[in-house]
Image: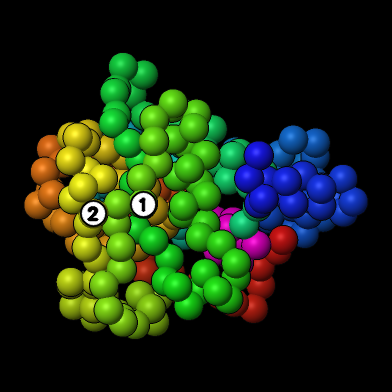
């Protein structure tokens, strides 16, 4: 058992888990209270606020290439993402990995799960990489490896502070791939916690293809609707 999982279980025995949506004590085995669990269920079923179709049939640009759990345009969606970014636990990661697995085709076969890593600065600050935690939990459920095949190159500004055009320019050349670890990999799941402009995902996809990966399935927790650009609020988030 990893140190993170052991610490997570120990804390859950001592301190009640708080709801990701409101901060109240959660129900057993889910990271939500009863009210927020109902709200989360509605969030997952919500139709696109732009075109009015469900996630699987959304006609907005880029949506067909990305599988995701919910739209990132409501208070609870922002609180969930903030909770994972600033207070991730192995329990939360495993919970969402189970839901994300249901977004994948039943007959699909993948060689590995990969993810764009969090900056070293933020890993030092918060003590974890939330995307790696979810990607690892998902890979374990699928019985495939989670590879640290993508690496950050040089110093780049945080994407959340930039406009859509600035994000595209900022992320250019921001990642490299470990060709050795990808040498036998042809089909991967590329996971990230949230997709806004798609700049990071597009850059990682380009790098993976240059390394010989033939098929890339993009999977995220949340996706910003095409016509909206939601900024994180650091004033309100729950553990």
Residue at x 18% of width, y 71% of height: 173
Marker count (numbered) = 2
Q: Is residue 151 rendered to the left or right of residue 146?
A: left
Check disc 1 and report its element: helix, strand or loop. Answer: loop
Toward the viewer: 102 or 134? 134
Residue at left offset 29%, top offset 23%: 109
Of the numbered discs in the image, which one, if any, rests on residue 178?
2
Compared with 161, 5 (above or below) is above
- Specify how the rendered protein is coloured: rainbow
Callout 2: SS: loop
Q: Position of residue 9 (x, y in %)?
A: 77, 44
Characterize the local packing of mark 2: few (<14), some (14-19) or many (20 or more) Cα atoms within 10 angstroms: some
Q: Is residue 122 above or below residue 135?
A: below
Is residue 157 visible to us here?
A: yes
Which quadrant: the N terminus?
A: top right
Task: Tell me which segment is drawn in magenta.
Answer: 77-87
The answer to whether the residue labelled 1 contacts the one labelled 2, judged by CB atoms less than 8 Å apart, is: yes
* Residue depicted at 29% across the width and 57% down the height: 150
Q: Residue furthest front?
A: 180
Q: Which residue in the structure is indicated by mark 1?
A: 148
Question: Where residue 81 appears, x then y in whole percent?
Answer: 54, 59
Instruction: Tell me if I can see residue 53 in this picture.
Output: no
């Amino acid at each position: 058992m990893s140190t993170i999982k052991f610490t997570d279980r120990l804390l859950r025995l001592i301190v009640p888990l708080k709801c990701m949506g409101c901060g109240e004590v959660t129900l057993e085995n889910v990271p939500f209270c009863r009210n927020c669990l109902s709200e989360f269920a509605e969030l997952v079923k919500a139709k696109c606020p732009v075109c009015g179709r469900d996630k699987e049939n959304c006609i907005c640009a880029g949506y067909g290439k990305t599988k995701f759990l919910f739209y990132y345009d409501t208070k609870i969606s922002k609180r969930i993402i903030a909770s994972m970014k600033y207070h991730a636990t192995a329990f939360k990661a495993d919970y969402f990995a189970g839901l994300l697995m249901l977004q994948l085709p039943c007959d699909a076969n993948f060689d590995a799960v990969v993810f764009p890593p969090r900056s070293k600065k933020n890993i030092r600050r918060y003590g974890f990489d939330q995307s790696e935690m979810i990607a690892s939990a998902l890979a374990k459920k699928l019985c495939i490896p989670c590879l640290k095949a993508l690496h950050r190159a040089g110093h780049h500004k945080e994407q959340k502070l930039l406009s859509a055009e600035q994000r595209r320019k900022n992320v250019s050349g921001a990642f490299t791939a470990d060709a050795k670890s990808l040498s036998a990999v042809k089909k991967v799941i590329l996971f990230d916690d949230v997709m806004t402009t798609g700049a990071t995902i597009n850059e990682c996809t380009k790098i993976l293809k240059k390394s010989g990966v033939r098929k890339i399935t993009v999977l995220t927790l949340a996706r910003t609707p095409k016509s909206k650009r939601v900024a994180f609020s650091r004033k309100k988030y729950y553990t």
